[in-house]
Amino acid sequence: MALIRLGFGRQHLRPTKRRSFLLLKLIAAVFAVLLFCEFLIYYLVIFRCDWPEVKTAAQNSGQQTLKAMFLADTHLLGEIRGHWLDKLRREWQMERAFQTALWLLQPEVVFILGDIFDEGKWSSPQAWADDVERFQKIFRHPHHVLLKVVVGNHDIGFHYRMSTYKIKRFEKVFNPERLFSWKGINFVMVNSIALEGDGCNICSKAEAELIEVSRKLNCSREQEHHSGPCGGEQPLPASAPVLLQHFPLYRRSDANCSGDDAAPLEERGLPFKERYDVLSREASQKLLWWLRPRLVLSGHTHSACEVLHGAGTLEISVPSFSWRNRNNPSFIMGSLTATRHALAKCFLPRENAVLAAYCVAAGLLAALYCKLLASPFLFGWNLLRKLKTT
């Protein structure tokens, strides 16, 4: 009888150790999956991105190169339409993507092309303050990196909901500059919602500001800065500007757009509505005539597109940065000098790839867990068989 008890004890210890080892493996596997899908995958994907080289015939011309990131349509969810789980998932994705890009790519300036918030057009003062606090946490950056923001329709509302109060509330936080120059490069940042062309007070003020910007840019193109209307002013760099806005310039549709992050095929042929999907023809022509930009970057459509306007002015529609709007978000990396530029696209992890990784891991972990649960039953069955044979 003593021999039977001793054998029982030894046999009992082995399955217990085995179960403990399997349990440790299960915990380690869960931790590894979470670490990969929520942290490491951003480094693995963004590590493949690199700054494009500016092709110029005069490498020693003395022009400095500015490294700029362009992203759009972050749509931080508000208190009305934002479910807490959706907020947590989307905002964690954007925070990890942005912080990883800052660490790996080291940009000098980041431009966000509107629709920072999803509910800025109707949010209460307290909700606005909460959204701003979350934005500042997600898109925190070192002091040597500039963050410049263009207003979007979800930040202040479309033209019919836009108000001076909402604009001032936005500008108090982001302090946008209509004309911004760095390293010999001029950037013009436009409130495209105010380009309705109906003569409203806000629209008239926006047009007057753009006319003044146009005058300064024209002065910078003149050879003589000491005569006429430009005399006595500090001249801007003699560089055609980069135009940044939320609404794209007028185009009929996305029919000519292509690429992995373009609009779905069934949506590309749908006609755009002026002053809603894109700027009006009149406003677009005014911007091109007043500013004569060499490059235009816009957001709003959530999809990528490249369009040539007028005498060959290139416009890039920057896709949404959030999984909420795209399965494959991306941003633009730009290397710019006073006369040239080179652009490259950097894709973020695909949401369906992350979900697929979770599904595969869940299946493997379920199998391991079933094995862990089955071991006590197998032990009991084997014990009964041995007792019967004795």
Image (tube, grey):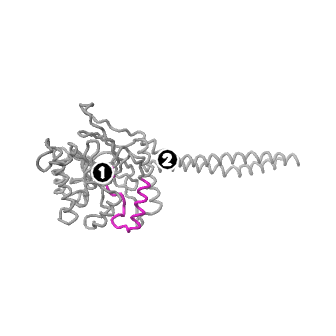
Q: CA distance from mark 2 to mark 1?
A: 32 Å
* Residue 326 image offset from top left, x and y in percent: 37, 53
Taking depth in this image into account, of 261 and 247 the one nearest to the observer is 247
- For the image shown, how many numbered marks are present on the structure? 2
Residue under label 2, please give it: 39
SS of the residue at dot 2?
helix
Tell me, yes or no, whether the highlighted magenta stretch contains residue 19.
no
* Image: magenta residue range: 111-138
Q: Would residue 179 be seen by someone viewing this image from the given angle?
A: yes
Q: Amino acid at mark 1?
A: Leu
Residue under label 1, please give it: 265
Tell me, yes or no, whether the highlighted magenta stretch contains residue 112.
yes
* Residue 107 image offset from top left, x and y in percent: 37, 43
Q: Amino acid at mark 2?
A: Phe
Q: Which residue is painted at 30% across and 58% down in the image? A: 152
Q: Which residue is painted at 22% across and 53% down in the image? A: 249
Give me the disc on residue 94: none
Taking depth in this image into account, of 382 and 56 the one nearest to the observer is 56
* Residue 389 image offset from top left, x and y in percent: 82, 47
Q: 75 left or right of 273?
A: right
Taking depth in this image into account, of 263 and 101 the one nearest to the observer is 101
